Image (cartoon, grey):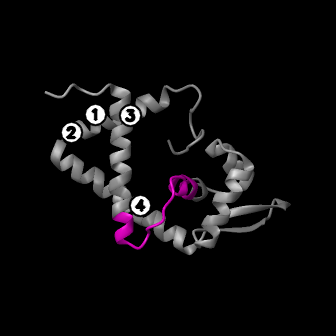
Amino acid sequence: MQEAHDFGILLGLAYQAFVGHLHRDLAKHGFTAIGPTVGYVLRAIAEGPINQRQLSKRLGITDQGTAKIVDEMEREKLVRRVADPDDARARRLELGPRGEELLRAARRFHARFERELAKKMGTSVEATRSVLEHIVASDPDETGRGRIRPM
């Protein structure tokens, strides 16, 4: 009989399996070259006005690292840089047309995945969600809309 995984290992394995399912689903919709930070960047931009420096802080990476990611995503029409009406020196980030399409496809997958899991597992899915939300909320270094970044 296989020994049970430690809780933290199980969380990591579950996340990796989920991302695998997500990427396979997105590939069916023509999104095949999705790097590990793309979803985090799209969601941060979709939450509201954000510039590159703010995105760097949100992701917990350097400004140079963020610039490289945004450059690649801009080439793929996932994001675009626009003038910031509040600061003439800054450029605000917005979702590009393909970024909006990708985010919609990812959100549909998330909802479908959770629905299918609930069909198989019943109310334990709600309990699992509560446990996960408690773990996230209890981290003093990552509270609220703190850093979101890939593992």
Q: Amino acid at mark 2?
A: Thr
For the record, the magenta segment spans 25-43
Labels 1 & 3 near each other (Cβ < 8 A): no
For disc 2, the marked residue is 123
- Measuring from the top left, give residue 114's x and y in whole percent: 29, 50
Q: How many marks?
A: 4
Labels 3 & 2 near each other (Cβ < 8 A): no
The mark nearer the N terminus, 1 or 3, is 1
Q: Amino acid at mark 1?
A: Ala
Residue 54, visible in the rendered structure: yes
The mark nearer the N terminus, 4 or 3, is 4
Can you tell which quarter of the image residue 142 is in?
top right
> Helix, strand or loop at disc 2?
loop
Question: What quarter of the picture does the N terminus occupy?
Answer: top left
For disc 4, the marked residue is 106
Q: Amino acid at mark 3?
A: Leu
> Helix, strand or loop at disc 4?
helix
The mark nearer the N terminus, 4 or 1, is 4
What label sits on residue 132 in the rendered view? Answer: 3
Labels 2 & 4 near each other (Cβ < 8 A): no
Labels 1 & 2 near each other (Cβ < 8 A): yes
Which is in the foreground here, disc 4 or disc 1? Answer: 4
- Measuring from the top left, give residue 26's x and y in whole percent: 39, 65
